[in-house]
Image (cartoon, helix red, strand yellow):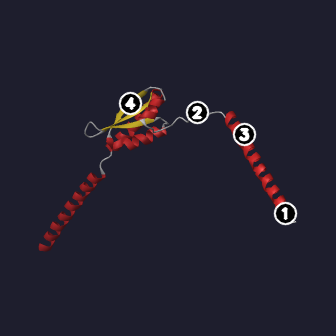
Amino acid sequence: MQEEVENRSVALVISGTKLTARTLKSAILKYLAWRKNKKVKEPAIPRGKQSVKNLAKQDQGLSNIEVTDKNIKSFERVAKKYGVDFAIKKDKSVSPPKYLVFFKGRDADAITSAFTEFTAKTMKKAERPSALAQLKKFAQLVKNSITDRVKSKNKEQSL
């Protein structure tokens, strides 16, 4: 009886192995068929800020403008708002360094609008007086008014 149990368990293991081999073979065949029928997707075109190399790969012609160091971040915000594909390159050969903003030729209208808004924001900031200068001016006024009051107070006491 022991021998019969052993034969049945060996037969069960062999049939289980055959089942997994068949299942694995059919799974691989189905995967290969799916890969063959699958359409190859083109890589997504990068948008917004990117490297000059990636921007040049798109073969749409490059143009550039110059932006100063102080306001490069504000330009990036405006360019993203207008959906412009751009790349920023730092020119270290001059002191202080300049930034060159490269963009696609087809984005010329959008970059013109973005640059117009950017310059308007920059000019608006330049028109505002410095908070530190105003603080110094008011501090001087307060100092002068206090000294005048002290002098007049002394005069009143001496009379």
| Disc 4 to disc 3: CB gap under 8 Å | no
Q: CA distance from mark 4 to mark 1?
A: 87 Å
State the SS at label 4.
Answer: strand
Residue 157 appears left or right of 114: left
Kindly give the residue lying farthest to the left in the view shown: 158
Question: How far across and down, in percent of the image, does residue 66 sit?
Answer: 34, 34
Question: How far across and down, in percent of the image, does residue 116 sit?
Answer: 41, 34
Mark 2 crowdedness (10 Å alpha carbons): few <14, some 14-19, many ≥20: few
Residue on which the image places disc 3: 29
State the SS at label 1.
Answer: helix
Q: Nearer the viewer, mark 4 or mark 3?
A: 3
Residue closest to the eye, 19 or 70? 19
Q: CA distance from mark 1 to mark 2?
A: 62 Å
Residue on which the image places disc 4: 64
State the SS at label 3.
Answer: helix
| Disc 3 to disc 1: CB gap under 8 Å | no
Q: Amino acid at mark 4?
A: Asn
Mark 3 crowdedness (10 Å alpha carbons): few <14, some 14-19, many ≥20: few
At x 61% / y 34%, what residue is drawn?
A: 41
Residue closest to the eye, 78 or 132? 78
At x 83% / y 59%, what residue is drawn?
A: 7
| Disc 3 to disc 2: CB gap under 8 Å | no
Kindly give the residue lying farthest to the right in the view shown: 1
Q: Amino acid at mark 3?
A: Leu
148 lies above or below 68: below
Whether residue 105 can be seen here: yes
State the SS at label 2.
Answer: loop
Mark 1 or mark 2: name the one nearer the start of the chain: 1
Residue on which the image places disc 1: 3
